[in-house]
Amino acid sequence: MTSISLENATKRFGRHTVLSDINLNIGDGEFCVFLGPSGCGKSTLLRMIAGIETLSDGELMIGGQRMNEALPAERRVAMVFQNYALYPHMSVFENMAFGLRQARTPKDEISTRVNQAARILQIENLLERKPKELSGGQRQRVAIGRAIVRQPAVFLFDEPLSNLDAALRVHMRTEIANLHRKFPEASMIYVTHDQTEAMALADKIVLLRAGDDVLKKGSIAQIGSPLELYHRPQNLFVASFLGSPSMNFVPVTLMEATDTGARVLLDSEEILFVPVSASHLNKGASLTLGVRPEHMVPVGEDVTEQVISRSLSSVENFGEYSFLYLAQTSDHPMIAKISDEAVSSIRGNIRFSVKPELCHLFDATGEALVHLNPSPKSVTFDDVTL
């Protein structure tokens, strides 16, 4: 088993800094996903671990050994690329065996490893075919098989499913999860911009930033389990990136901060309580309230506390659930996610109850105020909107 550690890792191309002071630990056998928008540096970070790119500053450790200057072949890593990178003139068997032959592995061992990987991936009947005779999913299996035969300590996946159609992506995502279970001793790092893949596969998500903020671009926004990032985002970037539709954001004013939390006033004159630490802020401070669409529950007139009232603008029906687009007096529209069964009874002005522990507050810098309650256990993964 092999752990991976990055300390103050930085990557520059000329004067342009792509990654800045990355500090990260990936445990033995852990499935870690590098997630983020295009241009955040996630693929560059993966290539630095693989040895395809060098570190400009900092230190990379694999299995407790410094690997800054080590050649890719010395790192015990195997990489699965986005474009498969198969040799078109070779059979499936020859593609999977190529790296072993280059390493002068004995012929019998090559045959054993290739056939074993083919059984794991259920492609035994494809070994004599050429890549042009394979479907996209089959080609991806061959690319994964080529990594398996090397018996690496670390598997690296660089957006391996992005060239597949939606249905096949779901199937191959399951195959990669099964691969992790079959090789529990191997660490896996997976790069994607797709939050669904990250939530479904990861033990740990490393969410990287991109954008116009030069000081934050190419840095880590948050590290944690999928549900930690979803339910307890540490800043506005994380809160807005995870979830589809995104979290609702509404400007509010701090009315009162106590030992148990904060009372805030919305532009629409409603008052909500949020159990966060806000005693360091002054009364009247401008904050941002965050509420996820699925945490807004329609209620009747008998409920008077923790209520947000909005008029209905439009509805999108998806069969299992619907999105309600809500009008606002300000420039901050809101979206609620409810079951399709409840849509038929909704008209005009709608009152929504929001549990205090499911609310978030962010300060003027975009950082989340610390929750005084643990992550809500009443919301399961089935409730997460992706």
Image (cartoon, rainbow, N blue to C red):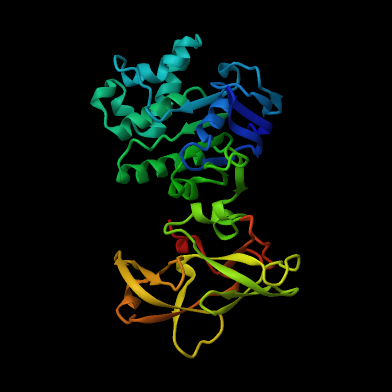
Q: Residue furthest bottom?
A: 302
Residue closer to the observer: 365 or 53: 365
In the rendered image, the vertical position of residue 104 relative to residue 253, given as above or below: above
Q: Position of residue 343 (x, y in %)?
A: 33, 76
Q: Residue at x 54, y 36 (%)?
A: 188
Q: Quadrant of the N terminus?
A: top right
Quarter of the image with the C terminus is bottom left
Q: Is residue 229 above or below residue 133?
A: below
- Residue 334: x, y in percent? 44, 68
Position in image of residue 46 (x %, y %): 54, 31
Which of these two is toward me, 196 or 185? 196
Looking at the image, which is closer to me, 347 or 130? 347
Q: Residue at x 39, y 81 (%)?
A: 349
Q: Quadrant of residue 220?
A: top right
Q: Quadrant of residue 82?
A: top left
How many numbered badges does the structure rendering display? Answer: 0
Any part of residue 148 in sight:
no
Q: Residue furthest left?
A: 133
Q: Is residue 276 left or right of residue 311?
A: right
Residue 53 visible in the displayed image: yes
In the depicted structure, whether residue 243 falls above or below residue 340 = above
Q: Position of residue 52 (x, y in %)?
A: 53, 21
Horizontal side of residue 180 vs 164, given as left or right = right
Q: What residue is rendered at 23% in x and 25% in y? A: 133
In-front residue for pair 92/376: 376
